[in-house]
Amino acid sequence: MELHEQIELIDRLLVEATQQREVLEHTMHAQQRTGTEGASNAPGTFVHPEPYTLQEEYAWWQQAHAGLLMVRNVLEQIEKSTRQRADHRP
C-alpha cells in the first residue's frame, strides 16, 4: 500500500473515531438530562454501570484518535522525506 493510501485510510479512521466520540457525547449528555446515569436506588430498579462504560469507551476513542493523528503525522513526514529524496536524485 502506498503512503498516500495509508494516509487516506488513517483519515477515514479518524473520521470514524470522531463520529464515535460524538455519538458517545450525545448519549452521555442525554443520560445526564434524563437522570438515567445509573444512580437510581428505587426498589426494583436495576442500576446500570453504563456511564462508566460510556466514559471509558469515550476515553478509548480519544486514545485511538490521538494515536491515529500521531501515525498520520509520521506517515506525512515519511512521504515528504521520500518526495524530497526523489527530487534530489541525479
Image (cartoon, helix red, strand yellow):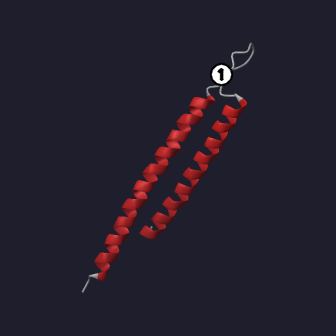
Where is residue 33? Give x, y as percent. 70, 33
Residue 46 lies in quadrant? top right
- Residue found 55% across the figure and 60% down from its top: 12
Choose between 75 and 23: the one closer to the eye. Answer: 23
Question: Residue at the right extreme?
Answer: 44
As drawn, 26 above or below 80: above
Image quadrant occupied by the C terminus: bottom left
Residue at the extreme top: 43
Q: Quadrant of the N terminus?
A: bottom left
Q: Position of residue 49 (x, y in %)?
A: 61, 26
Q: What residue appears at the point 40 percent right and 55 percent down from the top-left corner?
A: 70
Outermost residue to the bottom: 90
Q: Mark 1 belongs to which amino acid?
A: Ala
Residue 77 appearing in the image: yes
Which residue is painted at 50% across and 65% down in the image?
A: 8
47 left or right of 84?
right
Element type at mark 1: loop
Outermost residue, front side: 33
For the image, the number of numbered tags is 1
Q: According to the image, label 1 marks what residue?
A: 39
Q: Residue at x 72, y 31 (%)?
A: 34
Looking at the picture, does residue 17 appear above or below residue 74?
Answer: above
* Left/right of residue 89 with respect to residue 42 in the rendered view: left
Bin the neighbour count of mark 1 within 10 Å (Cα to Cα): few under 14, some 14-19, many 20 and up: few
Residue 71 image-quadrant placement: bottom left
Q: Is residue 12 above or below residue 2?
A: above
Q: Is residue 2 visible?
A: no
Q: Quadrant of residue 89?
A: bottom left
